[in-house]
Image (tube, rainbow, N blue to C red):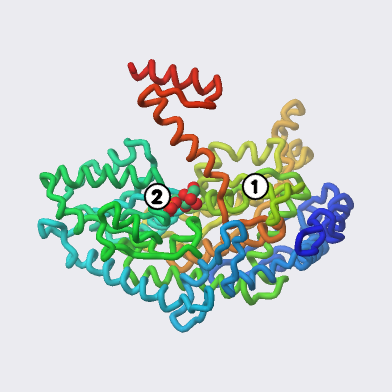
Amino acid sequence: MNADGRTRLNQTPEWTALGRHREELGEVRLRELFAADPGRGAGYTVQVGDLRIDYSKNLVTDETLRLLRELAAATDVFGLRDAMFRGEKINVTEDRAVLHTALRAPADAVVEVDGENVVPEVHAVLERMSGFAGRVRSGEWTGHTGRRIRNVVNIGIGGSDLGPAMAYEALRAFTDRSLTFRFVSNVDGADLHEAVQGLDPAETLFVVASKTFTTIETITNATSARGWLLDGFGGDEKAVARHFVALSTNAEKVAGFGIDTANMFEFWDWVGGRYSFDSAIGLSLMIAIGPDRFRELLDGFHLVDEHFRTAPAEANAPLLLGLLGIWYGNFHDAQSHAVLPYSHYLSKFTAYLQQLDMESNGKSVDREGRQVDWQTGPVVWGTPGTNGQHAYYQLIHQGTKLIPADFIGFAEPAAELSTELKAQHDLLMANFFAQTQALAFGKTPEEVRAEGVPQELVAHKTFRGNHPTTTILARELTPSVLGQLIALYEHKVFVQGAVWNIDSFDQWGVELGKVLAKRVEPALTEGTEVPGLDASTIALVAKYRELRGR
Ligand code: F6P
């Protein structure tokens, strides 16, 4: 029994019913499901905004979906959803509200935290961001010597990097090409070194993005960037004000670092790092695509927020995607989930989703702090098609693992491509459609034999098929569509966390490594003996020092 009086997840009748259903279904074949229901392709589809989501190639029947929805009802997913939208402190271990949805709410919406409507503040910051972004884009905001800014370097890590870096790539076709954007995250000095290659300090703006403004990687890189800038200005400290802005919740630390808080764009502790790129953390992106396009992105998010908040369970896309993941992770022992965008512009999308999903649902205790005895978040992975086809798809097609996958594709190539390059789009998308077909239906030994393949190769050339995929298709990758896609995944992750009864909004698991790194550093630099260091690490550190000639 849970503290709130609810039965433990895997002891609920709904969970048991799903387990039984899984046994009864056995090796259900997609070939048979499609043969039995000619309307399956169109029927197992949901349209959300611009996203057409086809889930027909999943190992589910109407009964499976009904039982999954009953599990969602029993675990009160929609109750927790409503509590999130209402601003209740559903991040229980940090005692915080979870209100990234307020970041994209229209100006006249009312979302209260501790009795105060936060929407006016959100829009006030958006206004300031728009003003600043507009000034940089027009050349009105100049550097210390009066030259216009041509390069923007975003320094941040995790949620303060992955979102803006991913979205900048995704929306490159909408960016101001006269400006250069670079994203520095790794504390490996090579990252900053490469990022500033060829840049003139007089034309470079550093955007230091950190919710806490204490993250060691970001502060270290920002300090080095400051050094690089000052070197370019003969040590003139006054230059910093025109070349550094901060995005943070922590004004005190920003001021302590030496950035004028007049050049700080704020957000709030009810915005989680991995849910923050539509807050002030999106400033670099806003400079790149302009405030109007940024608003379109926010409206895309909001459209899916509203869908998630209001659509009935049968037609609720994030609910559906979340439940499908539960079906595979908890009832088919799938360990991972592939996200395969057929768009070069989405090259960083899966890396972004890794933090969103794995930092949110990589938990093994429930909201009451007890060990869960059911699987939680999957390993999320993938890279854009068609590249993946020539690398790891072999394992998805013929390996021994069940890997559910999302295929994301677009009908239109980017408008600015040449006619010749646009013509390649059909080939890209032919691969997109062919892969989900091959994964679902495979090729039987009989079909292989009928092609005249010698008997000794038949097993090798047989495709088992029955690999589940979900297809997400939109007309074009626009700012709004990107917002819709991200919100879809945000809420999918939410649904899964709600069913598993875990806190999807904390991230205590990243703390231990941070603490140990601080402790180990003097052993590397000074050779200091660190109490409690294990024998393996002591030997490795000694070797490291030897290799560095210390
Ligand atoms: O990895 C832990 C984490 O706290 C993430 O959740 C966050 O996105 C990242 O570090 C960066 O944090 P900050 O924005 O405070 O620098």
Instruction: Locate the N terminus by quadrant.
Output: bottom right
Q: Which circle's residue, 1 or 2, is located before the other in the chain?
A: 2
Q: Is residue 169 visible?
A: no
Q: Is residue 105 visible?
A: yes
**Left or right: residue 311 compared with residue 27:** left
Residue 430 image point, x, y percent:
55, 53
Q: Secondary structure at mark 2?
A: loop
User: Are circles 1 and 2 on residues that touch, CB within 8 Å?
Assistant: no
Can you tell me whether the CB of the residue at mark 2 lies under 8 Å from the nearest atom of ligand 1? yes
Quadrant in which residue 487 is drawn = bottom right
Instruction: Locate the C terminus by quadrant.
Output: top left
Can you tell me whether the CB of the residue at mark 1 lies under 8 Å from the nearest atom of ligand 1? no
Q: Give the residue type that dot 2 points to.
A: Thr
Image: 23 above or below 193: below
Quickly name the residue at label 2. Answer: 214
In-front residue for pair 248/347: 248
| Residue at x-position 19% and y-position 47% | 229
Q: Give the residue type that dot 1 points to.
A: Pro
Residue 370 image point, x, y percent:
73, 50
| Residue at x-position 70% and y-position 63% | 41
In-front residue for pair 476/484: 484
Quickly name the residue at label 1. Answer: 378
